Amino acid sequence: MIKIIKLFGLLLAFGFLQNINAIADSKTFVVAQRTFQVPETWKAEQPSSKMRKAQYKFGKTEIVVFYFGAGSGGSADANVSRWLGQFKEPKEELSSKVEKKKIKSDTITTVSAKGTYMSGSPFGEKTPMPNYAMRGAIIEFKGGPVFIKMTGPIDEVTKSAADFDKTARSGL
């Protein structure tokens, strides 16, 4: 019995290490049978919740990917409004920009904003992060929307905006 437990422990550890290596080397993520390309500058992380399908870091900037399936996750407009509401300032003071484009048979909505981001879980305590920016993309297609959101210091988000947009469009 002890040998079985040790063997099981070794197999678990081996699987865990393989998973960590896959995360560290991952320059793509697959959501709803679509493959998205990730820039070399983004470092893959283990998603911090079951809701997250992929998670990356670029300096202090966090990039997260959500997918809930067809008919789930809410409308693009509702998510844009919710994301802008994660800032301390009123929406009118965020220098926000929202664009919606049809690409092939899909629709991509991008949103950007700058201000004091209120970091924290949806129902938990919030930490004000001044001089932060957010860039988000909602990719709507037959399989359900994919949500990609990047938040971090303004200079880092601005520097990575082109890479973010390229990643968001790579799965189309």
Image (cartoon, rainbow, N blue to C red):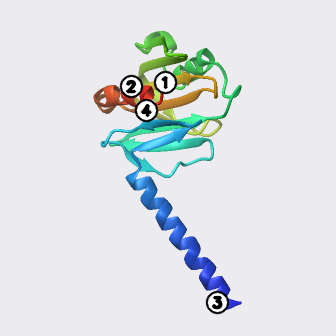
Does label 1 or label 4 sit earlier along the sequence?
Answer: 1
For marks 4 and 2, the one nearer the N-term is: 4
What is the CA distance from the residue labelled 1 to the residue labelled 2? 8 Å
Mark 1 and 2 residues: CB-CB less than 8 Å, in contact?
Answer: yes
Label 3 vs label 4, nearer the camera: 3
Q: Is residue 139 visible?
A: yes
Residue at numbered disc 4: 151
The residue carrying mark 1 is 137
Check if mark 3's residue and mark 1's residue have beta carbons within 8 Å. Answer: no
- Which sits earlier in the primary sequence, circle 3 or circle 1? 3
Label 4 close to label 2 by CB (< 8 Å): no
Q: Label 4, label 2: how many angstroms apart (C-alpha)?
A: 14 Å
Q: Secondary structure at mark 1?
A: strand
Left or right of residue 12, residue 59 in this image? left
Is 89 left, or right, of 152 in this rendering? Answer: right
Label 3, label 1: how far apart the Cα atoms are: 50 Å
Residue toward you, 3 or 57:
3
The location of residue 92, given as percent across then percent down, is 48, 9
Q: Nearer the viewer, mark 1 or mark 4?
A: 1
Look at the image and tell me in which quarter the N terminus lies: bottom right
Q: Residue at x 59, y 18 (%)?
A: 76
Q: CA distance from mark 3 to mark 4?
A: 47 Å
For label 2, the residue is 165
Decide if residue 132 is in sight here.
no
Determine the CA span between mark 3 and mark 2.
Answer: 51 Å
SS state under label 4? strand
Residue 3, numbered circle: 3
Q: Nearer the viewer, residue 112 or 32?
A: 32
- As shown in the figure, which amino acid type bears the numbered disc 4? Thr
